[in-house]
Amino acid sequence: MKTSDFFFELPQHLIAQYPGEQRGQSRLMTLDRATGKRAHKKVVDLPEILDSARFTSASGGKPLLVFNDTKVRKARIEGRHEKTGASSEFLLLEKKDEAGKIWKALVKRAKRKKTESVYIFFDSKNKETAKAEISGKEGEFVLLEFDRAIDDGWLEKNGHIPLPPYIKRKDAPSDANRYQTIYARETGSAAAPTAGLHFTDEILRGFASRGIESAFVTLHVGLGTFLPVRSENVEDHLMHKESFTITEENAALIERAKAQSRKIIAVGTTSLRALESSSYGDGIKRGWQDTSIFIYPGYKFKAVDALFTNFHTPLSTLLMLACAFADGAFSGRELILESYAEAIREEYRFFSYGDAMLIY
């Protein structure tokens, strides 16, 4: 299977640079993978959609929604080279020691960055607040060794929201709220689980009032989900590892829904990957786990019956996952690319701050 099979042309003006004025008011395309039928709704309609016969089990059981409640950390920091004064932007991905002094980071032109180079980091008043030396490299990443512990408190004061590179602007104060789900709980993500950005308290109450339950997983989104596929053949791509956890309470909710043959709806690709990675037979593995699962057409799903997700970038592992999920009576790849072409004609907004899709 060729990576180039997952390319599509997208007009630049359809890449959402800002969130919609109100959460929940984004457009929603629904796609029935059995018939190929599409419909155009709004995200705010989702409680009513999921309360329909299509999503109700034979015994009358309502579906279960599974959300990812990870919280995005302000992990983007800008440093100046101690000798040249040149600025470089680093995205801190994970701590490599208990003290929090060594971090794995993404930086442009990492291969050109010299080890032992020192960068100085400043606060909003241009006062030095930390120094770091590039102490080593891990593939396309660098290791930054700081002269002090870098924790979420420091990042909250000195870091920036890590907006994705296709958003061509600096982060604004409003992004601290809008690039975060309303139910975000545990800090650890380098990017938002963007399908969840659509939900409001009112929409969540709408589910509950209809007897539609919610469960949560916590998957800290890393760059593995978003790094481009550089191999010519899809099968040759290797995913980076991400960590996630499922509590006893939430695992029991998911297992009960499976036992009752109720529909399980993943809110976002991260929730889906956690569910598929933790599922075994009728059970769900508890506690902290790692996953490097790579889902592309041909994958056989074990746990998820419907996927609520955004529109994804060309050639990405996320697009490949959506194509795999749409497989059924039709080729999932063709069905998704046809749906994306319709979304483009209808001027849907794409990517993190864009519109949404429900595949069932």
Image: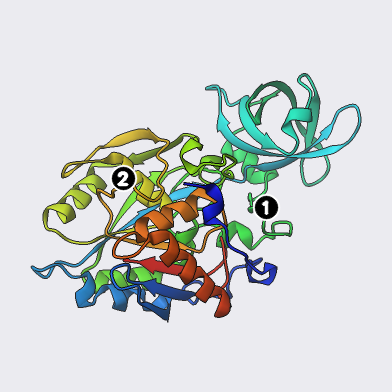
Q: Is residue 88 above or below residue 215?
A: above
Front in this rendered view, residue 25 or 310: 310
Please indicate whether residue 135 sits to the left or right of residue 282 in the image. Answer: right
What residue sits 58% from the left and 71% below the top? Answer: 349
Front in this rendered view, residue 224 or 3: 3
- Pick the quarter of the image with the C terminus: bottom left
Please indicate whether residue 235 sits to the left or right of residue 298 in the image. Answer: right
Q: Amino acid at mark 1?
A: Pro
Label 1 SS: loop
Q: Amino acid at mark 2?
A: Glu
Q: Is residue 267 above or below residue 200?
A: above
- Residue 83, position in %: x, y? 90, 27
Residue 268 appearing in the image: no
- Residue 109, position in %: x, y? 75, 36
Name the mark on residue 276: 2
Name the mark on residue 165: 1
- Residue 208, position in %: x, y? 26, 69
Q: Disc 1 versus disc 2: distance between alpha carbons?
A: 28 Å
Front in this rendered view, residue 291 or 24: 291
Q: Dot 2: within a 10 Å radius of its alpha carbon, few (fewer than 14), some, or many (20 or more) residues?
A: some
Q: Are marks 1 and 2 in contact (CB under 8 Å)?
A: no
Give the image quarter of residue 140.
top right
Identify the colour scheme used: rainbow
- Residue 22, position in %: x, y? 53, 75
Label 2 SS: helix
Farthest residue toward the right? 84
